[in-house]
Amino acid sequence: MFEDINKIKISESARHKASLLKSRTGLTPNIIARFAFCHSLNVPGIPESAEYDSDGMEFNRYTITGSYDLIMMALLAQRLEEDGLSFENAKEQFRLHVCRGLELIFYRVKSLLDLHGLFEMEIKS
């Protein structure tokens, strides 16, 4: 179902934010992208492709999802269904959720503790 999602290229702005988040948290960009993707899935609305170019860093899907690949792709499938999108949109939506997530967490995360607090807050909601 998600075989065509091998690589994604995030926006230049998202790449820049991932780099700055790396210096703030000490986490590698792929781990930050994983958190960003999950955070974006929790935000209502479909991310708009016009907001994000594809001039930034390229990621291998498994570099982002790691051992959580099946879970993360199931979450993406559920989100596609909730948003009324077909699986043909999966690769682009994966990319857009990573980009949107990076934009969203950038202003809220100044340290590793902020990242923990961000998800702790969402779990309580």
Image (tube, helix red, strand yellow):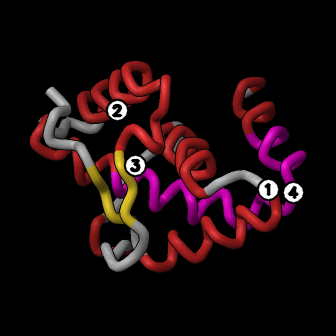
Mark 2 falls on what kind of element? Answer: helix
Label 4 vs label 2: CA separation? Answer: 27 Å
Question: Image quarter for residue 39?
Answer: top right
Q: Amino acid at mark 4?
A: Ser
Is mark 1 in CB contact (under 8 Å) with mark 4? no
Q: Amino acid at mark 3?
A: Gly
Q: Position of residue 98 (x, y in %)?
A: 45, 53
Q: Nearer the viewer, residue 55 or 96?
A: 55
Residue at the image point whose x is 35% and y is 43% from the top: 61
Q: Nearer the viewer, residue 60 or 88?
A: 60
Classify mark 4: residues with Cα within 10 Å, few (<14), some (14-19) or many (20+).
some
Q: Which quarter shows the C terminus?
A: top right
Label 3 vs label 2: CA separation? Answer: 13 Å
Label disc, if present, on residue 76 of the rendered structure: 2
Q: Which quarter shows the N terminus?
A: top left
Frontmost of labels 4 and 2 is 4
Q: Is residue 91 above or below residue 68?
A: below
Q: Which residue is mark 1?
A: 26
Label disc, if present, on residue 45 of the rendered structure: 3
Is mark 1 in CB contact (under 8 Å) with mark 3? no
Is mark 3 in CB contact (under 8 Å) with mark 2? no
Q: Position of residue 55 (x, y in %)?
A: 34, 79
Is mark 2 in CB contact (under 8 Å) with mark 1? no
Q: Is residue 115 above or below residue 124?
A: below
Q: Which residue is mark 4?
A: 111
Q: Earlier in the sequence, mark 4 or mark 2?
A: 2
Q: Amino acid at mark 2?
A: Leu
Classify mark 3: residues with Cα within 10 Å, few (<14), some (14-19) or many (20+).
few
**Where are the magenta residues, as a range?**
95-118
Mark 4 falls on what kind of element? Answer: loop
